[in-house]
Amino acid sequence: MVYDSADLSINDLFRPVVAAEDALARLDDRVARKSDLNETARRSGSGLMRENEGWIARSHFMEACNALWLAGELVHVEDLVLHDARMDIRTPTHELTRAHNILRVRRQIASNSPAWALSAKGMATLRGRWMSDVAMPNMTPEPVALSEFTNETRTEAESAFEDELARFDALLDRTSQRLLTPAKAAQPKGERRLEKKSLTDAVTSDGDPLVYDPDWDEDERIGRWMVVHDMTRDLPPLLAAAILWDAWEDIEPLQHQHWLGPMLVSAMLRERGKTRSHLAAFNSGLRNIPRDRRRARDRGTRLTAFLGAVEAASIANLKEIERLGLAKIQMERKLKDRRSTSSLPGMIDLVLSRPMISAGLVARELKVSQRGALNLIGELGLREMTGRGRYRAWGII
């Protein structure tokens, strides 16, 4: 089935599009102006992180947790922050591992060029598997750079080393087959034949059939979504983003990475120049939209819900930047008459860059003792957010 957007009523979407575009533009302009101030501060010798950088770092954590919340799974921001710092206080759960994967993917998209995520190489990297050329008909494959050592003559030592590795591989294969022979001999012939067939067909091009549905052609579905992406090039950026998000929800290209859709929509806005200073965050706004509106049968209702989510998320992020700015001003007052080797400026950077911090995290990042980390936390007057006697975490309230 082809996703068709020809029957959309532009009149019904005009007001939500304008409101969402205005809110997102104000947020991006605010981040851009703060980035200019940051560059001026760096040139003047000030190394303190400003509130927009802290918000960008925090938004990645929050978006990862909100993405899993939309999928019906709960991950605490505190656990994600500690897991990202490799300081887990308990065994990481499957949900926490997924949240960290979302966090790393979002950082990867934000750190690369605007057009990277929607390119053939970017899509393949984000999926974790290479795609066939047929699946991405509208993507121009990137030229493969030929090495200048391709036709280099190998020495006798190199050839002997490769032959030795080949012999080792053959020996390992024979050993594996030998170990499997006694177990197979004890089974009836029918079961051995069935096992041989299952082992042969176990891994397909789309992955293990125990995990991936063999009938779910991800390459073909991504190709259909990219067709919708090409059809929306002449539309306003936010309207195109709404259609792309709805198409992703309708087509469902990826079985286990459905959370990638909003990130690709954010990358599209960044590629088209709508958000030049940050990677848009939609999940926080979608979380506040009722499910019956996000999953409504009427397409216009779904698009309006997405545009409302963009507006709500942009307004909330503007307030968050203001809140971080006020907190920064209050904490910087503590720097008066401090020695130049004080760890307090680095402590302010750490507090602004993460939603929560722990004493162990502060000690590791600032290279101080646990007692010194608690002293720095006490000097800044941070609020304890976990309400526990052990494994406590602090943050800005």
Image (spheres, rainbow, N blue to C red):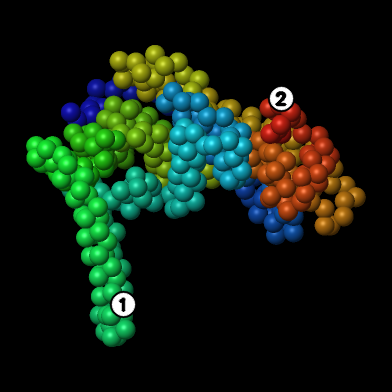
| Residue 320 coordinates in the image, percent (x, y) | 64, 32
Q: Residue at x 40, y 34 (%)?
A: 259
Question: Where is residue 292, by image quadrant?
Answer: top left
- From this view, report whether residue 10 is shown above or below residue 195: above
Q: Nearer the viewer, residue 232 or 54?
A: 54
| Residue 96 coordinates in the image, percent (x, y) | 50, 35
Question: Where is residue 31, by image quadrant?
Answer: top right
Amino acid type assigned to the residue bearing label 1 in the image: Phe
- From this view, report whether residue 4 is shown above or below residue 280: above
Q: Residue at x 18, y 28 (%)?
A: 1
Which circle marks residue 2 in the picture?
A: none
Q: Is residue 310 visible in this depiction of the protein? A: no
| Residue 184 coordinates in the image, percent (x, y) | 17, 45
Closer to the observer: label 1 or label 2?
1
Q: Is mark 1 in CB contact (under 8 Å) with mark 2?
A: no
**Circle 2 — which element?**
loop
- Tell me the CA gap for discs 1 and 2: 60 Å
| Residue 90 coordinates in the image, percent (x, y) | 58, 35
From the image, tell me which residue sits under label 2: 387
From the image, tell me which residue sits under label 1: 161
Question: Where is residue 353, by image quadrant?
Answer: top right
Check disc 2: other Cα within 10 Å, few if <14, some if 14-19, many if 20+: few
Q: Earlier in the sequence, mark 1 or mark 2?
A: 1
Q: Nearer the viewer, residue 84 or 328?
A: 84
Q: Residue at x 52, y 43 (%)?
A: 278
Amino acid type assigned to the residue bearing label 2 in the image: Gly
User: Left or right: 30 with respect to 297?
Assistant: right
